[in-house]
Amino acid sequence: MPSKQRVVVVGNGMVGHHFVQQLVTQQGDRKNIAITVLSGEDRLAYDRVQLSSFFKGKTEDDLALTSNKTYQVWQVSFHTHSKVVDINREEKTVTTSKGESFAYDKLILATGSYAFVPPIPGKDREHCLVYRTINDLHAIKKSAHASKVGVVIGGGLLGLEAANALKQLGLQTHVIEFAPQLMGVQIDGAGGRLLKNKITDLGVTVHTSVATEQIIEGENSRYKMCFKGGQTLETDMIVFSAGIRPYDNLAREFNLEIGERGGIVINNHCQTSDENIYAIGECALWNNFIFGLVAPGYAMAKVAAGHVLNHSSSIDVDEFSGADMSTKLKLMGVEVGSIGDAHARTEGAISYYFEDQPNGIYKKIVTNEQGNKLIGAVLVGDTSEYDNLLQYHLNNIELSVPAESLIMPLAGDAGELSADDLPRDAIICACHKVTKHTIEQAVMQGCSDLNAVQHATKASTGCGGCEKLVQSVISSALKNKIATLNPVNEPVSQSA
């Protein structure tokens, strides 16, 4: 009887755990895989996307994505506090900082990324922290008890999440951003200006176009931040959230191919330059691009799991072909949405704008040169059209109404897509790549509400942004199911 294939997973973040989940699910009853998970952290996988909820009362257990018991049931061998420090590619072994060695047939690098801390003199002082892990949250919480003023360096998505955390901890909060606007990756200049105004109205002071030159002892607070141009700001705590960098050190040390600006180079099966080593998530570089959202990482995990299980068989395996980077979120109560080419960089792109200054709402959509396909959008202050616009974009649906009517108020249901308008292969849940057809099948097999469909398909269990659309597909599928079971022309039997 052939021995089991040994799969070692380095890293147990959201993507690393999803790979394990996919491997267990996809192998079914074959049970021919021996899975070992090595986590450098002191705990198993947890939900990094919802980290800020820790400061709203959620516990570590609430954020947990798995448990010792679950991995035991799945027959997964797992080790925490087990940072991998050596890869022997010839012997196919990895060694941890504890000196333990593990043999592999296939090695999965799911090491993620780390918080980038700019090389600012004085950055290594006490109460200068990062916002990345649960342990970081504990350090921020502890520092906040001895602080009155807090500063976040970085005005991107994670920076604003960190600022929200400091505000919830009762600190006078500032955000320092080197660029001229907030969230410059996701939204345009006009959207960034409105976002800044809304966050300022919530009591957070935002400083844009500011470069920190050094951190020194303060006069009235713990530290003084000195900016280019002579300005200063005193603070008791500094949280660095100035972006992420791929955690690719293992690949660098052991001669796997690395991109010019970092990241472990992978092919469409998520294999590195060593065919027995895969990389997934934020440490991986595909087509010279690193994906900083969880949904693309989940897609990579699914592809890699399928290839590990089936690459030597005649079964066709999925390939990773990129991922949509659209996102919808709520920052400090402010709704923000970004879809596709939000900056209208595509040649010939046409932009349409709507701004409601009294109510703090800004909307922009971007179409192709012909004006019949939606290729991008920005929504600030109101994301009620997000799901509809995203489906136009993801499914390349031709616009049947004037483009501007998609974001103009008082337009009724103009351009509103129903579940029936979407193709069977439309991606409804981007996080887990759940299609309309998959949800419909779940309904036909007995799932009659959102909870049941979530359990059966995982739709709307990632970021949760697609919940309304998932519910719409369920409602449509239930109607179709009833119609199928009770044809219009079939007489209804009557009892005496």
Image (cartoon, helix red, strand yellow):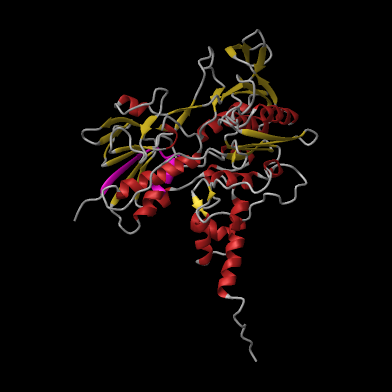
Would you say 211 lies left or right of 289 here?
right
Q: Where, by quadrant of the figure, is residue 227 drawn?
A: top right
The part of the image, by quadrant, that contains residue 9 is: top left
Left or right: where does residue 129 sit relative to residue 384? left
Residue 279, how many percent across, how many down?
37, 36
Q: Is residue 59 above or below residue 477?
A: above
Is 193 positioned to the left or the right of 277 in the image? right
Task: Let me know if residue 44 appears in the view.
Answer: no
Note whether 50 is above or below 199 in the view shown.
Answer: below
Q: Residue at x 54, y 13 (%)?
A: 122
What quarter of the picture does the N terminus occupy?
bottom left
Count the numbered circles shown.
0
Tell me where residue 356 appears, x and y as whole percent: 77, 35
Q: Is residue 293 above or below residue 18?
A: above
Which residue appears farthest toward the left when viewing the image?
1
Which residues are drawn in magenta? 5-21
Residue 339 among magenta residues = no
Residue 270, position as x, y percentages in the image: 36, 39
Identify which residue, 259 or 371, lies in the foreground. Answer: 371
- Considering depth in this image, is 356 or 243 the residue closer to the camera? 356
Where's the C terminus, which quadrant? bottom right
Q: Is residue 128 visible?
A: yes
Q: Nearer the viewer, residue 420 or 311?
A: 420
Query: In this view, which residue lies farthest toward the top?
Result: 230
User: Closest to the observer: 87 or 141?
Assistant: 87
